[in-house]
Each structure stands twice: as structure tokens, then as C-alpha cells.
Amino acid sequence: MKLHKKNVIIVASFALAMGLISTPVPAIANYLPADTTILRWLDKVTGRVSTLEARVGDTVAIGTLSIQVYTCMTRPPEEAPESAAFLKIIDRQSELSNAEVFSGWMFASSPALSAMDHAVYDVWVLDCENRSLSISE
């Protein structure tokens, strides 16, 4: 059976619309921007687990990793909870000298969907929050 490109696009569009397949990129319209990403990381050698906060646009360092947060988004309170962050993670002591070990979206509810593969560290997103909002009287 020969499939034409047009037919494949129609079937894929229908399956996407019906929820039969999903895309790992969040629909921007359903998310609210946040200014702070809450990350958890694990040092597999020592077993140390720690939580850190990173502001959007900042780069934080843990061990030999540099984590740059490009964006962090969360769903409105009336929708199912979900947070997603776009991160770039570089290993500064790699044999390849500053090797990129991860670049992409990480989802709080599904850390295994888009996980970083590293011999020593695991990093995952816990939440996205707005820390710079001030309540005015």
C-alpha cells in the first residue's frame, strides 16, 4: 500500500486533534509564563539530592554542569497542574570541552519524557513560579 504525503498529513492531523498522539512541545496558549524554575538534581556518586531555584535567563552551576533556563511555563490554576521549562545543560568538564548534554523541554509531571542522560547527574523540573510579583496595597 502506497501512502501519499497528503494522506499522511491528514491522518496525522486527525490523530493529533483526537488526542491519539501528542507533541512534547507545550501549547503556548494554555500556559502562563513564570520567572523562576524549581529544579531538583541528584549526584549519582554520592547519592546527594538537592533542590535549587533558577531565574529565567540565568545560568546556575551544580557540580560540573551549567544549567541555562530559557523559559518556564505553568498552567493556570483551573487546569490540570503542569510546568514545563526549556533548558540547556552543558558539562564543563567533559572530554569534549563544554559538551551540551541536554537542550529541550523538561516537564514536571513526566520527567522521563525528556530526560538528561549523564553519568553522574540527574536534573529534572519540579515547578515554575512567579517570585518577582509583588502584591500592591
Image (cartoon, rainbow, N blue to C red):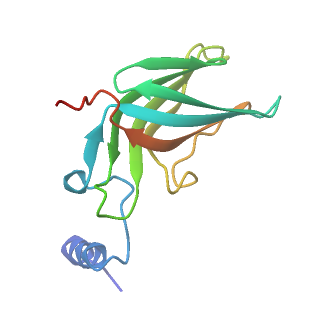
In front of the other: 133 or 48: 133
Which quarter shows the C terminus? top left
Please determine whether, in this image, residue 83 is positioned above or below residue 80. above
Q: Quadrant of residue 51?
A: top right
Quarter of the image where the N terminus is located: bottom left
Name the foreground residue: 17 vs 3: 17
Q: Position of residue 96 (x, y in %)?
A: 61, 17
Which residue appears at 52% of the width and 56% of the height?
110
Give the residue furthest to the right: 46
Depth order, front residue of 39/112:
39
In the figure, 96 relative to 54: above or below? above
Q: How many dots with numbers?
A: 0
Camera-side residue of 1 and 109? 109
- Point out residue 101 in the picture as x, y percentages from the top left corner: 56, 30
Q: Position of residue 2 (x, y in %)?
A: 32, 81
The x and y percentages for residue 28 are: 23, 50
- Kindly identify the residue that appears in the image at 60 percent across and 14 percent down: 92
Tell me: residue 72, above or below residue 120: below
User: What is the quadrant of residue 64 in the picture?
Assistant: top right
Q: Is residue 48 shown to the viewer in this render?
A: yes
In the displayed structure, would residue 59 be above or below residue 34? above
Taking the image as shown, residue 66 lies to the left or right of residue 2, namely right
In this orientation, does residue 105 appear? no
